[in-house]
Image (cartoon, grey):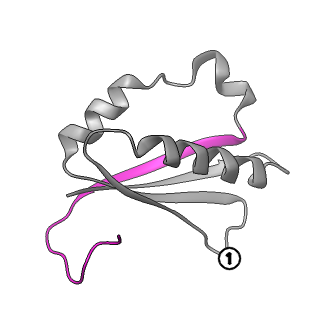
Amino acid sequence: MFVVISHHWCKPGQVEVACERVDRNGAAMTAEPGFLYRYRIERAAQPNVVSTLTVWNDEADYQRFRGKRSGGGADAPSLPWERIESDAYEVATAHGKPPV
């Protein structure tokens, strides 16, 4: 499995809009080959950051998905976040059952 954790630093007053957009994007990802699941996660200490944990079968599936997406381009000024930072991980071990 391949896990991507992303943090979206929101523009002032744009957290709710960012959450809605992230959730729409997550719902759309369910049709992508190799997509397993996505969580939008919150941290009380950083209320202006919208984070996601997304899991794919493998890195190749994630890279195919990324290859279909644009880099923001002309749409960037209208986005509700200032920047996104992501980290990617290969799952080395797992315990318990994946979510249904």
Nearer to me, 27 or 42: 27
The answer to whether 38 appears left or right of 12 in the picture is left
Q: Could you tell me the amino acid type at mark 1? A: Ala
Residue occupying image coordinates x 72% and y 67%: 47
The answer to whether 5 appears left or right of 74 in the picture is left
Residue occupying image coordinates x 69% and y 49%: 20
Nearer to me, 88 or 100: 100
Numbered disc 1: secondary structure: loop
Q: Position of residue 19 (x, y in %)?
A: 67, 53
The answer to whether 65 appears left or right of 8 in the picture is left
Residue occupying image coordinates x 68% and y 42%: 81
Q: Position of residue 2 (x, y in %)?
A: 24, 54
**Residue span colored magenta:** 80-100
Examine the image and state in which quarter residue 97 appears: bottom left
User: Is residue 98 in view?
Assistant: yes
Magenta span contains residue 86: yes
Farthest residue toward the top?
74
User: Is residue 10 in view?
Assistant: no
Q: Position of residue 92 (x, y in %)?
A: 14, 68
Q: Residues within 10 Å of mark 1 (few under 14, many from 20)?
A: few
> Is 36 placed above or below 66 here?
below
Instruction: Name the residue that disc number 1 marks.
Output: 44
Magenta span contains residue 55: no
